[in-house]
Image (cartoon, helix red, strand yellow):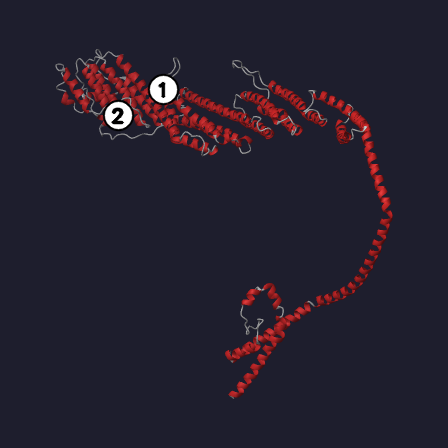
Amino acid sequence: MADGEAAGTGTETGTGTETETGTGTGTGSSWRRPHGPLQRYYGLPAAEAAEAAPDPIDINGPHFDPEVFLAKVRSECPLGQLLAREAALGREIRALDSDMQTLLYENYNKFISATDTIRKMKVDFRRMEAEMDDLAANMAAISTSSARVSAALQDRHRRGAQLAGVQTLLRKLQSLVEVPGRLRRWAAPGADPARALHCYARARAVLRHYRHLPSFRAIEDESHAIMADLAQRLRARLRDDTLDPKELTECVEMLLQLEEPPEELCEEFLSHAGARLETELVALEAELPPADPSGAAATPPPASDILDFVDRGSSAFVGNLCLLAASYRSLFEGCPGVGDGRLEAFAAALTARYFELLERRLALERGLGDTSLLVRALDRFHRRLRALLELLPTAGAEAGAALVARAAGERVARYLRALQTFFLGCLGDVRQALAAPRPPGKEGPGLPDLLATLASSVLGQLKAVLAYVQLFTAKDVAFASLPYFKGEFCVEAVREGLVVAFVRWLCRTARGFADSPAERGAPAAPPALLLLLARLCLDYEATTISYILTLTDEQFPPEDTGPAVTPGPALCAEARGAAQRLLDHYVQVQGAAVAQMLRKSVETRDWLGTVEPRNVRAVMKRVVEDITAIDVQVGQLFEEGVRRAQSSDSSRRAFSVYSSSRAPGRYAPSYTPSAPMDTHLLSNIQKLFSERIDIFSPVEFNKVSVLTGIIKISLKTLLECVRLRTLGRFGLQQVQVDGHYLQLYLWRFAADERVVQGLLDEVAASAAHRCLDPVPMEHSVVELICERG
């Protein structure tokens, strides 16, 4: 059974192997044959294929060996795997047979067509070979016949060529004979001299060459006489002032063709061109008013705008100068004795005159006008000048660029003056608003509103001016590419000459209200205006200056290697200094106003004969009211500030006529008429140990500091006035009542209540020292009178 199964298995295996082998050698070899050419075209290179070792068991490889493959399979694969491999090979064989049949069916018509085409080509090539043989025989016969004909006609051809040459020569001779007649006809007045010159130029070389022959000499002499007459007429025409540049060029060109001296023609050309250009400059000058060196007479406004003036100058003068320069180059280039030096000197003199007229016209633009119109006019001038400089590089390039730069700088300077005028107008409006009477129950604009209006108006006007000035550096403007407008204009003209100069002028103008005394008869600046300008300068120092400089640097970026600029902190320091000076002056003005009331109240009262006080004097109430109004006014623009810690009984402290309110009983027994110096001595001793009060010290930018400065000036004035008066008992008591009233209300306005208390103590001590009968009033009575008042 085992042997039978083995035999059966061997038979099946052999069958399967034979089938596989047959497939590999028969059908497999038929569809593997194209692998060689395909591998050469698509596959590995020959070197790599040679390097690869032959594999005899690769059924798809070129070195496949069936015997080796079968031996390997029988020795390694079990029966089940062999049967599966046989089934797989059978399926592959059937699939390949099906594919081959499909290819054959699909390409059958192509194979049939190819077979028919090859059969027809064989027949057609046989017929074509016969026809080509016949054609070759015919061409040989034609060549032989052509050779015989050429040999027979060679003599006639030679004689015909000689006759043709004689005919051509006769025609030329006839043309030479007809030259004088043609020249006479074309050179006649009103005819075509250019055609006559062309004819004479063609015949001149031949006539000169055969001049030794009498006939040719006669033709040349007659032609020369005709052309000489033409040259005379052309020279006469050259002196005509009505010739335009094109006609002038044509006239000179024809004279050069007639071999006239180039030096003389050059002089006449420049003379005629100069006269015509001078006429155009005179026409431009006629539009300008006569120059007045003194400047006393009023200059009338120009008849046309600057753009029209530049257009006329550019189209007429500059355009004709460019045309004449190009004509000069084309006419006299290469001529001996004539160079560009004459043309450049000629053009430089005329352009200098034109620049002078244009600068006079620009000087008439006194107002701001339309800046875009000025920029367009300068742009057109620069573009036409650049076209002229391409022909004549030395015809005033630096002068033209300087003219544009001066015009731009002058417009920036006018904008600066306009900004200054606008600011002064805004200040006038503010002063008018502060001084305008207001009906009862209707309040005008407050200081914050006036400050916001002033600051926004000035800043808006400055931004509008920068937008106008930025037109000079626009990308579509030709002269914006000049080095001046990339560096110096942005820094020196705009940033320093306009923005920085305006900020500094604003600070100087504001500071002038505090530094310069008012003229005789002129109204002094109202204190509210001083306060408002101080706040404006302080705002400029805080934010506005940095914003303006940043905006300017963005719109007019300076170069890294450009000139030095004014730093922002320096401007901020100037603005802060102006604000400090204005605020100090405000304190002095308001303090002087309150002090004036106190001084008059002290000087006009009889302190020896006064009656016993029953009320607080009205001037003290007015002082408290004025200080309260100043407190409200300053509080609208400045912050509160920091106050020193106050005691709980500040409003109820005792006010003594002695040197210190804190110790009235200590010095009272010693202050008697028998010993008047003791109290004065004790007062001076106490001053040595008290804190010194600086009356006119600079104030800080807050409300309590400002009010403290005003109170110090007022009380110091009261102290000095009391020292100069002699008081009786009731006069001393009145001072005691007034001082206590001021102490009740003024301490809350000061940064440190001890300043108010110390000054009032000095007033009381001075009054006691100057009193003939120093008997103070009871403190309870003083408080009662003050509360009732």
Q: Name the residue under label 2.
A: 747
Q: Is residue 266 left or right of residue 118?
A: left
**Quarter of the image where one finds residue 575:** top left
Q: Position of residue 603 (x, y in %)?
A: 26, 12
Residue 154 in the image: above or below residue 288: below
Residue 233 is tagged as none
Residue 224 in the image: above or below residue 65: above
Q: Is residue 379 left or right of residue 133?
A: left
Q: Where is residue 703 in the image (x, y as percent from the top left)?
A: 32, 27
Residue 134 in the image: above or below residue 480: below
Q: In this view, does 310 lie to the left or right of 785?
A: right
**Quarter of the image where one finds residue 740:** top left
Q: Where is residue 101 in the image (x, y as percent from the top left)?
A: 66, 71
**Quarter of the image where one finds residue 118:** bottom right
Of the residues under marks 1 and 2, which one precedes in the sequence? 1
Residue at left offset 84%, top offset 51%: 147
Q: In this view, does 397 lie to the left or right of 132?
A: left
Residue in the foreground of this view, choosing between 709 and 100: 100
Residue at left offset 52%, top offset 77%: 72
Q: How crowded is mark 1: few (under 14 residues within 10 Å), some or many (20 or more)?
A: some
Q: Looking at the rendering, in which quadrant would you find the C terminus? A: top left
Q: Helix, strand, or loop for circle 1?
A: helix
**Which amino acid lies under the numbered mark 1 shown in the image of this protein?**
Asp
Residue 515 is tagged as 1
Q: Residues within 10 Å of mark 2 (few under 14, many from 20)?
A: many
**Which amino acid lies under the numbered mark 2 shown in the image of this protein?**
Trp
Task: Tell me the CA gap for discs 1 and 2.
Answer: 31 Å
Residue in the foreground of this view, choosing between 534 and 350: 350
Q: Helix, strand, or loop for circle 2?
A: helix
